[in-house]
Image (cartoon, helix red, strand yellow):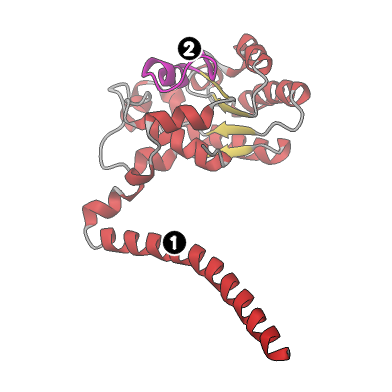
Amino acid sequence: GSGDDSVCKENVARLQALENADISQTEQQLQALKQTSGSDSDASADNSETSVLSDVQIRQVFAGSVIIGDSITESIVEYGYLDTDVVVSKRGLNVSAADDQISTAIALNPSHVFMAFGSNDLELYGSASSEFVSDYKEQIKKIQTALPGVPIYINSILPITDDAIAQTPDLGYYPDYNEGLIKLCQEMGCTFIDNSAIVTDSSENLYEPDGEHVIQDYYPKWLTHMAQTAGLQV
């Protein structure tokens, strides 16, 4: 009779509670892991290390995406993380001269587009960050027109060391460029990816001697950060 009914309801409730508990338990375990490693200052600094994608995972998650950029992006291929079916880049490239790369990227018909320009543009546009932004906007428009509904992610320009700026003062405008890109993303419905924490939070120096380019260790962290931001799954 009605007794059985309530038992049945209880079981359903218990099952639901279990399902929810599963999720929160995993969360708790993650938190616990963080806390235990937190007791040891070195471990907490390297906390993020554990979640960096492996080389195989990087290939899996970026399959079908495209990353467009300059020499900093080019190194993704040079270090062997991804191939030219995902990475469309050219050393020394600035955003306004990237027409061929944009066309190639569009032809690949990607599910997600990542753009990384700015390191060469700084010396080209100098203090005129608004011109850089408007040229970037034109390229985004091309992609949006050709690939409606495909999400576009704009990578920040990495912080540049004081020594590099002392030698090439125009490099010092990078914060203005990033501000401009954040506004551009809001205007165009794109997602801004701030990568500065990768270099600032790192216990090692991730810069090449020129204070602008980055060493190989940066790349798996950057690719992981891009994948996480875009919600790319294996």
| 183 over 45 or under it: above or below | above
State which quarter of the image contains the N terminus: bottom right
Q: Which residues are magenta?
A: 70-90
User: In this rendering, would 2 be left or right of 86?
Assistant: right
**Are there few (<14), some (14-19), or many (20+) residues within 10 Å of tag 1?**
few
The answer to if 89 sits in the magenta stretch is: yes
Foreground: 29 or 162?
29
Indicate the quadrant where residue 41 lies. Answer: bottom left
**Are there few (<14), some (14-19), or many (20+) residues within 10 Å of tag 2?**
some
How many angstroms separate mark 1 from mark 2 (CA)? 45 Å
Instruction: Choose the circle earlier in sequence order: 1 or 2.
Output: 1
Name which residue type carries label 2: Gly
The answer to if 66 sits in the magenta stretch is: no
Indicate the quadrant where residue 64 lies. Answer: top right
Q: Position of residue 139 (x, y in %)?
A: 68, 21
User: In this rendering, would 155 be left or right of 166?
Assistant: right
- For the residues carrying marks 1 and 2, which lies nearer the camera in this image? 1
Residue identifier under label 1: 26
Indicate the secondary structure of the residue bearing disc 2.
loop
Foreground: 40 or 26?
26
Residue at the image position 33 percent from the left and 60 percent from the top: 33
Indicate the secondary structure of the residue bearing disc 1.
helix
Residue 180, disc: none
Foreground: 216 or 195?
216
Residue identifier under label 2: 92
Name which residue type carries label 1: Thr
